[in-house]
Amino acid sequence: MIIADRKPINEILYMIKDCKKILIVGCKGCVTVCNVGGAKEVGILASILKIARKKEGSPIEIDEKTIERQCDNEYVETIKDIVNNYDAILSMACGVGPQFLSEMYPEKRIYPALNTTSIGGALRHGVWSERCAGCGNCVVHYFDGMCPIARCSKSLLNGPCGGSSNGKCEVSKDIDCIWDKIVRKKMQEGRLDDLLVVREAKDWSTARDGGPRTSIREDIAE
Amino acid sequence: MNELKSGSNLEKVLKAGHFAFTGECGPPKGANVEHLKEKIAHLKGVVDSVNITDNQTAVVRMSSWAASTIMLQEGVEPNFQMVCRDRNRLAMMSDILGVYSMGIRNMLCLSGDHQSFGNHPQSKNVYDIDSIQLIALVKKMRDEGKFMNDEEIDTPPKMFIGAAANPFADPAEYRVYRMANKIRAGADFIQTQCIYNMEKFRLFMKKAVDMGLHEKCYILAGVTPMKSVGMARYMASSVPGMDVPESLIKRLQGAEKGKVAEEGIKFALEQIEEFREMEGVAGVHLMAIEWEHRVPEIAERAKMLPRPKI
Ligand code: SF4
């Protein structure tokens, strides 16, 4: 799923400093699953903002609405009758949400309440970790199910750099060196030979480097 | 290893079977050419060629190619270093053509420290290709006369290709295989990370020799004399992939007041003596960080002088 973190409250307060009445829109997709943009988090953010503005002496009115998905116009449309009641809309979805909202409601100011960080999964309750860089040409099978493009700080394709130490990446002791894991698994499973080759330079044209991407399913595209 | 691949001095020295001696020089944090020339002067005639680092530790400095050409003008042969952190493949290939046109004949291909170590941690990290792919690229340009995309090069750059190996990084058992991959990709010479743990290095070299790697590539052992106990401690704790045994720190601590640096040099000299005899080691790469002026003395005491002229 898509992982996100909430922006600092002060940054959000600054965005909406001139607003008197706003709508916070949550999303029941990924950000609900990673506990950052669902109905519950929308409620919490609304309370925090209201309290802060009250303290500042400029109270704000905030309504809450959480829709199925902000990445689907079908659902973005469901708020069309109420958007005009607000000075601005604060989206609690990944970066797709504020854009779909802006496209459908061009006259409205739409602000992002989240910072989208990565495509990943839950390691345990409350902890999410990046797994995919969306490069457009999956190669995880070469690396025993671990993606060095997303998970090595240098996206190395030919083994661990000289900074790998005790299973940790040179960048930080909080980051696992994925190449350490790949090498150990290959050795353990007797597949070291897989690594005794020179893997060619990657064609990045399928990644974001080739420009924004569109996926078309010919059979169902309207 | 029949014909000369690049005709560089380093290649000739190694090919003639001499025990090679290379140095290292960091470009200035600015355009202070005089200071660079001063550092270069200390190394002239004392080593066979000198690595010019490329924004080492991800700190912006004068570009390695520019410093390499200045070195060349000063009559010292550079080993032009290139890291994968700052350039995409277009910039790499054009810089390779550029430095070759300026007369540079040795090149060291590196991944490079992550930018988070340096003074612009906000920068984008490029890593379009990795160090092994860079080695393969320089080889392809030289031997096939082609760019990465297979287009023909009009007058291909003929480089003597270097790579780094760190016998002390993890996973330890894999390190010799990684060096083998660099040789497979086309490395003509290897310079290792600074060695302090001799025990580990002996094992590493034994494996390399058992695999016959020393017959396919020249392996130069990395030496950096310790200047102080603080430096040893810092390297032990804060430099990823560095292995400084406690025994060495104790030895430096045991030195008389004002004699710690001398003890560090003594240890380096003992190392060099052992490397001369060690099977598979073709030379020493001396990284005397901001200590270029001590290199002539170290070379003298290590009986490295005079350097062969070929
Ligand atoms: S330490 Fe490991 S994860 Fe970090 S950059 Fe090096 S190879 Fe990649």
Image (tube, helix red, strand yellow):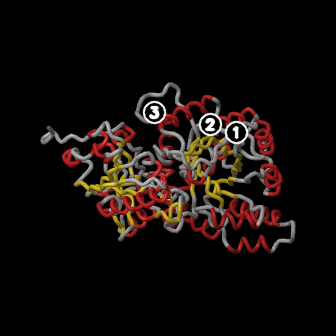
Say what amino acid the circle numbered 1 marks: Glu
Q: Residue at image x 55%, y 58%?
A: A162
Q: Nearer the viewer, residue B84 or A99?
A: A99
Q: Amino acid at mark 3?
A: Phe
Secondary structure under the numbered disc 1 in the rendered image: loop
Q: Which circle's residue, 2 or 1, is located before the other in the chain?
A: 1
Discs 2, 3: same chain: yes
Left or right? Give the position of B208 relative to B234. left
Q: Examine the rendered structure and indicate whether residue B103 appears above or below residue B83.
A: above
For label 3, the residue is: B147
Circle 1 sits on which residue? B77
Q: Residue A85 in the image: x percent, y percent? A: 29, 46
Q: Residue furthest left?
A: A219
Identify the secondary structure beneath mark 3.
loop
What chain does mark 1 sit on? B
Task: Tell me if I can see residue A113 in this picture.
Answer: yes
Residue B236, which numbered label? none
| Mark closest to the chain's N terminus, 2 or 3 | 2
Q: Can residue A193 be seen from the camera position used here?
A: no
Query: What chain does mark 3 sit on?
Result: B
What is the C-alpha distance between the residues marked 2 and 1? 8 Å
Percent x, y of residue A116: 39, 52
The chain letter under disc 2 is B
Q: Which residue is mark 2?
A: B105
B18 and A158: which is toward the camera: A158
> Are dots 2 and 1 in contact, CB under 8 Å?
yes
Most foreground residue, B76 or B83: B83
Q: CA distance from mark 2 to mark 3?
A: 18 Å
Q: Residue at x 55, y 63 (%)?
A: B169
